């Protein structure tokens, strides 16, 4: 208990100091990478240390079958996390995310969102999303789709499993361009409700809510959501814990009283620090020990499976898996991979580079994110750059929790239709620039002038998004 108490005191001092400094000097706002980092750290480290100090059992501590995670391991992990919080804070204080509340300048040229690109992509995503909901989700009152052989690799392919999210992403993309209309708001509520009942798809609910709130903030040119929206996000965060079990209970037709009991038990577990989703610090600590026992450094090789990610596993059953290093370090006494555990992005950095990774990766990641944030908010709200940053910002908690692989997985894969929109804009702009340069080289001034008029996708912007639907 004394070890946990000392670690908790250091951590609380870290959280308070870093938060006050960022709020006062760091250009803090809802979409700033520090906001997600604060939530990640408090949930992963601070709240867990409070639970352990109050008597919660450490990972594997009550099993009798596996090797319990010891207090010194957890203290070590918490100190590494505090070190990372201080180093990222230092970067965010040195490089502010935004320069204040002033609107972006209107005398520069920015790549703007083009409805001619958004509309067809969102329309296709909407239709494919409806198909995905029918094929790959449990819809109350409807029988399961039986068009796939359950033993087939295609039935569990990510290409099929991600389709239901396209419905919600299409709606959110429309809202970003046109605002919250009655129809789109209802469709968004239907999507979030369906995803909350799927059990294992909780992240789609949270990311969908975060994106909806961030769009609300962007359209009103605010830095923070309203109090009611903050309250709603807080309530959703607490409902996140029992959502997996409650969703499955609703699918099985369990009684309302039994569901209420499950929610009440979840609240008790959260208060006492026993919930499974509060064990990330323990998992991080266990991973550090297992990595030391293995004595191996990966030097970035763990990211190589991303190169083969687009190939369906049905066509390549032995395709390399993401986070395969978790299988390497797991043991019979601590079967972390079999339980789907994580080591956070700090543990991933340690797996790659040892202690040097703990020292260097957090500030380098913080620098990349804050430079992206600053550049995005130097552009108008209807720019492609701002849109791309918003998509990344709502996924940052997953990046901090699961590792840098999630930078790709939760943006390019899980938000595929919206990222296709971003890539199509840049591709179209690149093609037009090349054509322009080719024509200007040998063309007369009148032809060159005509070509400049065609570059309508790069135009000065007032920062206003489209009209309300």
Image (cartoon, rainbow, N blue to C red):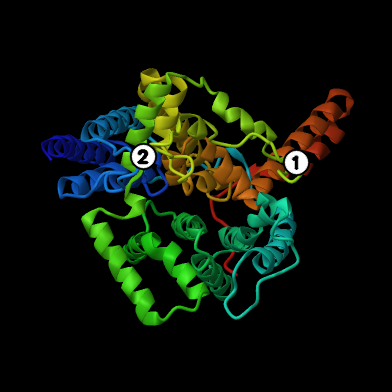
Q: Is residue 118 above or below residue 298?
A: below
Q: Quadrant of residue 65?
A: top left
x then y, percent, for residue 214: 46, 55
How many labels were placed on the picture?
Answer: 2
Disc on res. 428: 1
Q: Looking at the image, which is closer to me, 331 or 463?
A: 331
Image position of 401 (left or right of 454): left
Quadrant showing the C terminus: bottom right
Location of residue 293 in the rendering, given as x and y in whole percent from the top left corner? 38, 23
Q: Mark 2–mark 1 contact, CB under 8 Å?
A: no
Label 2, secondary structure: give it: helix
Quadrant for the N terminus, please: top left
- Does residue 83 appear left or right of residue 244 in this picture? left
Q: Residue at x 43, y 33 (%)?
A: 331
Determine crowd level at label 1: few under 14, some 14-19, many 20+ residues with C-alpha closer than 10 A. Answer: few
Residue 283 image label: 2
- Circle 2 or circle 1, nearest the eye: 2
Of the pair 73 and 60, the residue shown nearer to us = 60
| First reached walking from the N terminus: tag 2 or tag 1 | 2
Left or right: 294 as drawn, with respect to 425:
left
Residue extending farthest front: 65
């Amino acid at each position: 208990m004394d070890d946990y108490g000392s670690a908790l005191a250091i951590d609380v001092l870290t959280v308070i100091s870093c938060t006050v400094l960022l709020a006062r000097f760091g250009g803090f706002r809802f979409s700033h990478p520090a906001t997600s980092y604060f939530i990640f750290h408090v949930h992963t480290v601070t709240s867990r240390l409070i639970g352990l100090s109050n008597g919660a059992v450490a990972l594997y501590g009550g099993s009798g079958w596996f090797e319990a995670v010891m207090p010194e391991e957890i203290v070590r992990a918490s100190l590494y996390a505090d070190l990372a919080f201080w180093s990222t804070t230092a970067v965010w204080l040195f490089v502010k995310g935004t320069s204040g509340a002033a609107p972006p300048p209107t005398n520069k040229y920015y790549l703007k969102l083009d409805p001619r690109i958004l509309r067809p992509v969102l329309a296709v995503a909407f239709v494919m999303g409806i198909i995905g909901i029918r094929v790959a989700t449990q819809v109350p009152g409807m029988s399961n789709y039986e068009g796939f052989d359950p033993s087939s690799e295609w039935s569990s392919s990510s290409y099929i499993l991600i389709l239901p999210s396209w419905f919600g992403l299409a709606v959110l993309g429309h809202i970003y361009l046109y605002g919250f209309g009655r129809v789109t708001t209802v469709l968004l509520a239907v999507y979030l409700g369906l995803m909350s009942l799927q059990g294992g798809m909780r992240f789609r609910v949270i990311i969908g809510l975060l994106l909806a709130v961030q769009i609300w903030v962007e359209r009103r040119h605010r830095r923070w959501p309203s109090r009611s929206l903050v309250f709603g996000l807080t309530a959703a965060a607490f409902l996140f814990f029992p959502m997996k079990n409650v969703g499955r209970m609703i699918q099985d037709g369990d009684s309302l009283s039994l569901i209420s009991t499950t929610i009440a038990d979840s609240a008790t577990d959260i208060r006492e620090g026993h919930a499974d989703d509060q064990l990330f610090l323990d998992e991080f600590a266990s991973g550090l020990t297992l990595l030391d026992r293995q004595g191996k450094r990966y030097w970035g090789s763990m990211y190589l499976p991303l190169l083969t990610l687009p190939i369906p596993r049905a066509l390549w059953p032995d395709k390399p898996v993401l986070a395969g290093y978790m299988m390497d370090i797991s043991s019979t006494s601590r079967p972390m991979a079999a339980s789907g555990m994580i080591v956070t992005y700090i543990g991933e950095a340690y797996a790659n580079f040892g202690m040097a990774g703990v020292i260097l990766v957090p500030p380098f990641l913080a620098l990349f994110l804050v430079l992206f944030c600053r550049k995005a908010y130097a552009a108008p709200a209807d720019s492609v750059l701002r849109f791309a940053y918003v998509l990344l910002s709502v996924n940052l908690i997953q990046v901090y929790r699961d590792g840098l692989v999630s930078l790709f997985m939760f943006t390019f894969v899980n938000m595929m239709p919206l990222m296709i929109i971003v890539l199509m804009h840049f591709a179209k702009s690149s093609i037009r620039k090349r054509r322009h340069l080719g024509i200007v080289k040998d063309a007369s001034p009148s032809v060159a002038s005509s070509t400049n008029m065609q570059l309508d996708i790069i135009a000065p912007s007032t920062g206003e998004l489209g009209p309300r639907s």
